[in-house]
Structure formats: C-alpha cells, structure tokens
Image (cartoon, rainbow, N blue to C red):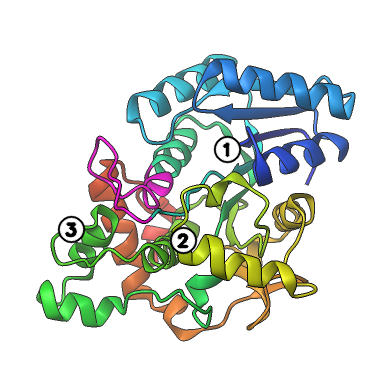
C-alpha cells in the first residue's frame, strides 16, 4: 500500500506515540495524531516533529468517550477532505479496581470500542477511507484465552442464564457492566478485547471490497500509560513477574511495530485477530485459531450490541447483501 495518509488514536503517549513516529519515518506524508485535548495533542505533534525531523503531524482533538467530540473530529476531517489510507485505532484502557462508567453509562474499558466504531463508520459514510484502506484496532492476548489472571465471559452460557439466549443483550450488558455482570477488572478487560475481536470479524463482512480490518495484539509492553488504572494484582504482581522473564516484555516501539506490520496485510486475512503464539507475549504475531473467536453468532451479536450502544450501524454492501 502506498504510504500516504494515516490517522492514529491515542497518540499522546505509549504505543500510539511510537506508532505515529514510525509511520513518519516509514514515509507517510501525513499522520493525524489525536488526543482528548487539543492543547495536549498539539504538544504531542510538536514533540514528534522535533524527534523525527518530519513535518507531517497534524493534531486533532478526539475524545472517544464523547460522541459530540467524535462528530466534531469527523466534521473537521470532512472539511479537510483527504481520504485515510491507514486507520490505527490504538486508544485503550485497562480498568481499575473500582468500576468506572462514562457519562453514557459505558464501562471505561469498553468505551474506546464504541468511540472507535463511531469514528470508523463516520469515515466510511463520508468516503474518507481510501479504496484500499487498512484498519487496525488494538487487541490483546486475553481475548484468545490462556492468559494467567484473565478470563473472558462464556457469552453463550451467560446469555442462556440471564437473557433467554439473546447474545446481543448479553454483550450489551458486558459493555455497560449491567446488573447481571460481576465486575472483575481483569475479566472486564478480557471481555472488552474479545468483543473487539468479534467486532472486527463482523466489520470485515461489511467493508467495501479492497478494504481490510484486523485486530492486533501489541503483546507485552508494560511501559505505557494504558495500565495506569490497573488493579494492584496486575500492577504489582503480574506485570513485575512479566518484566523479569526474558522476552516476555517489549518496548513500546517493538510492540507498535506489530500495528505497522498488519497495515500491509492483504484482504484474504481481513477480520482476523493477530497475537503472539499461545503462551507468549512477544515475538511474531499469528492468526489466532481458537474456536470461540470464529463463532459467527457471537460476532454478529457483538456488532449489534455495539450498534445499540452507539446508535450507528453500517449495512452490508449491496454486493454482499445480494449473496448473504
């Protein structure tokens, strides 16, 4: 893919910052960097320009927890009128010891997906993704299972127990951390990342031909602000242990390089979740083959739950609908 225009969310620190820097050094002509406040992201853009010696960074205010902020960002992008070749949905949050809900009633670890959904669908509706655009969203190893201290919800069983088998209602409850959901920070994080993997698979079926989307786990990279709210067990037990094991932790730059690698993947693997090999948190990424990731009913339920919470849908393209 021709290196031209990219947009990266969550660029004021950590993986987003590292990814934006590497995109510039890899030849992108413009990298739109986003943050919750305009002043903060302007500072980020200036720092990136000074470090890379590249005058390609454009700041954009974007608070993914605020639908009005997403709409304002979209309006600004429409005004500029430049289609985006690489959309990196990096912003995320590890939940803390106490449950936190956004103003819209969304659990904070789930909220970035809702904002990213609104942003992505808005860009598609405005024809602001290039015909061969690549979309990468940050996943995480717990979505595949087998990660100590993290367990995702068995959605079919949860739906059967509390929602008469309605998986859409069950996943919406997880997104909102509803009354039937027991708040366990690490499990909430695992659920958020599993829902992302399902959302990606559903989005891939709705994208125009030529575009592709992937969920990509950056792997172990604990030196980022994403864990600033993490609970004590994660922050003071799991992460220190990971840091002591050779090869289990990475620099933000090494982790962010996975995003850039995925930006070159073909449409044949669109909708897939890429992460480390089972039992690892670094090294090469590979398509994850765990059966729960390929449960189409759960994928579509996740999509419909996100649509209900966000209020924004994307129908199948006409060419797909005709054969579905």
Q: Main secondary structure of the magenta part?
A: loop
Residue 214: % across, % down: 59, 59
- Of badges 3 and 2, the one in the foreground is 2
Q: Residue at x 21, y 77 (%)?
A: 158
Q: Which mark is residue 232?
A: 2
Q: Residue at x 25, y 47 (%)?
A: 309
Q: Is residue 135 magenta?
A: no
Q: Which mark is residue 286?
A: none
- In the displayed structure, 211 sits above or below 22; it is below
Q: Which mark is residue 178?
A: 3
Q: Residues within 10 Å of mark 2 (few under 14, many from 20)?
A: few
Residue 51 occupies quadrant: top right
Q: Tell me which numbered mark, 1 or 3, is placed earlier along the sequence.
A: 1
Residues at badges 1 and 3 in contact (C-beta under 8 Å)? Answer: no
Q: How many marks?
A: 3
Describe residue 168's horizontal placement relative to residue 111 as left or right.
left
Q: Residue at x 24, y 53 (%)?
A: 176
Q: Nearer the viewer, residue 196 or 265?
A: 196
**Span of residues in magenta:** 97-114
Q: Secondary structure at mark 1?
A: loop
Q: Is residue 306 visible?
A: yes
Q: CA distance from mark 3 to mark 2?
A: 24 Å
Q: Residues within 10 Å of mark 3 (few under 14, many from 20)?
A: some
Q: Is residue 104 magenta?
A: yes
């Amino acid at each position: 893919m021709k290196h031209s225009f990219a947009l990266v969310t969550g660029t004021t620190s950590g993986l987003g910052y590292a990814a934006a820097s590497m995109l510039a050094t890899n030849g992108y002509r413009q990298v739109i960097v986003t943050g919750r406040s305009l002043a903060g992201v302007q500072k980020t853009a200036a720092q990136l320009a000074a470090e890379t010696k590249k005058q390609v960074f454009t700041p954009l205010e974007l608070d993914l927890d605020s639908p009005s902020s997403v709409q304002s960002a979209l309006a600004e992008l429409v005004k500029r009128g430049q289609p985006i070749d690489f959309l990196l949905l990096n912003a995320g949050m590890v939940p803390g010891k106490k449950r936190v809900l956004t103003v819209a009633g969304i659990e904070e670890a789930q909220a970035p997906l809702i904002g990213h959904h609104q942003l992505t669908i808005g860009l598609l509706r405005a024809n602001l993704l290039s015909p061969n655009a690549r979309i990468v969203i940050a996943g995480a190893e717990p979505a595949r299972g087998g990660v100590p201290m993290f367990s995702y919800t068995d959605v079919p069983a949860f739906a059967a127990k509390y929602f008469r088998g309605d998986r859409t209602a069950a996943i919406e409850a997880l997104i909102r951390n509803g009354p039937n959901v027991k708040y366990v920070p690490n499990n909430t994080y695992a659920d958020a990342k599993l829902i992302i993997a399902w959302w990606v698979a559903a989005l891939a079926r709705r994208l125009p031909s030529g575009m592709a989307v992937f969920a990509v786990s950056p792997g172990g990279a604990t030196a980022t602000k994403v864990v600033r709210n993490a609970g004590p067990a994660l922050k003071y037990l799991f992460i220190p242990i990971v840091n002591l094991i050779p090869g289990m932790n990475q620099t933000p730059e090494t982790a962010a390089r996975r995003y850039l690698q995925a930006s070159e993947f073909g449409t044949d693997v669109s909708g897939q979740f890429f992460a480390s090999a089972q039992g690892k948190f670094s090294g090469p990424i590979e398509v994850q083959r765990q059966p729960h990731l390929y449960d189409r009913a759960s994928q579509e339920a996740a999509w419909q739950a996100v649509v209900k919470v966000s209020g924004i849908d994307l129908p199948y393209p006409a060419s797909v609908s005709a054969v579905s």
